Amino acid sequence: MSGSWRSGFGTRRAWERSVDRRVGWLANARRLGGACVTNGRVEVAALVGSLRRQSYNRGLLRTAMLLQPEGMRIYEVPIDRLPFYDEDVERQGDPPPVRELKTALARADALLILTPEYNYSISGVLKNALDWASRPSGRSVVRGMPAAIMGAAAGRSGTMRAQLHLRQILLYLGAVALPEPEVYVTFAADKFNTLGELTDQTSLDQARQLLRNLHAWTLMLHASRG
């Protein structure tokens, strides 16, 4: 896991300059109909890319809910009932689970995705949720939304390749994934206890910092809208 500001964007100041350049575009995008921070509280929609009840990434979501900074509320958006994306189905109108997905995402100020790694990429169920969220074309409910990514896996890569693919997808959707810290929980079996709780201190510190960064970035975006 990378905890240094000297990866990705080079230095913290370089990252801040990049943020400054993106704020105007993102503010305009969210002004088209996105959510708005209310009373200083940041609402974060969470997508878990695993359907397994005892998955490490579901444990990572529980950890995030415990670590969320003051002024943030994380809520899960279920994706287990979504049909496979099908344009023929879409033409008849979004099915109820899809409408629920889009409504839950639209009322969020930010997005948190907890992804496993399947065959060097993200899971099919997560990709399907993002495919539905991307529609109609050019009017995705996550357009302009700040996003954070975490992932846990049993192997040594810790979802590194899945997160790279996910960043590419979010870029196309118009969401902006925070560059750091990159939260890759490797060898997850050794870092979660039998209750599914993350116990590795380094991973906990990384997750806590990512949520703080997401909170600050979302408030910055809100302030730019005046």
Image (cartoon, grey):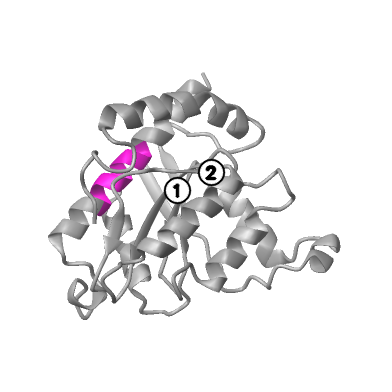
Q: Residues within 10 Å of mark 1 (few under 14, many from 20)?
A: many
Q: Determine whether 9 is above or below 27 in the image.
A: below
Residue at 79% across / 62% down in the picture?
90
Q: Main secondary structure of the magenta part?
A: helix
Of the pair 153 and 90, the residue shown nearer to us: 153
Residue at 64% across / 55% down in the picture?
133
- Magenta includes 123? no
Provide residue 21's location: percent of width, then percent of height.
47, 24
Provide residue 147's location: percent of width, then percent of height.
45, 46
Q: Hey, which quadrant is residue 15 in on the image?
A: top left
Q: Hey, which quadrant is residue 61 in on the image?
A: bottom left
Of the pair 185 and 34, the residue shown nearer to us: 185
Amino acid beneath label 1: Val
Q: Determine whether 184 is above or below 196 in the image.
A: above
Residue 197 in view (yes/no): yes
Provide residue 137's location: percent of width, then percent of height.
73, 48
**Disc nearest the viewer among 1 and 2:** 2
Q: Determine whether 154 is above or below 128 in the image.
A: below
Side (left or right) of 139 relative to 176: right
Side (left or right) of 167 relative to 16: right
Provide residue 193's location: percent of width, then percent of height.
19, 76
- Looking at the rendering, the stretch of residues picked out in magenta corresponds to 207-215
Residue 40 in view (yes/no): no
Q: CA distance from mark 1 to mark 2?
A: 14 Å
Which quarter shows the N terminus? bottom left
Quickly name the residue at label 2.
175
Quickly name the residue at label 1.
44
The answer to which of marks 1 and 2 sits earlier in the sequence is: 1
Amino acid beneath label 2: Ala
Of the pair 186 and 73, the residue shown nearer to us: 186
Side (left or right) of 65 relative to 119: left
The mark tally for this picture is 2
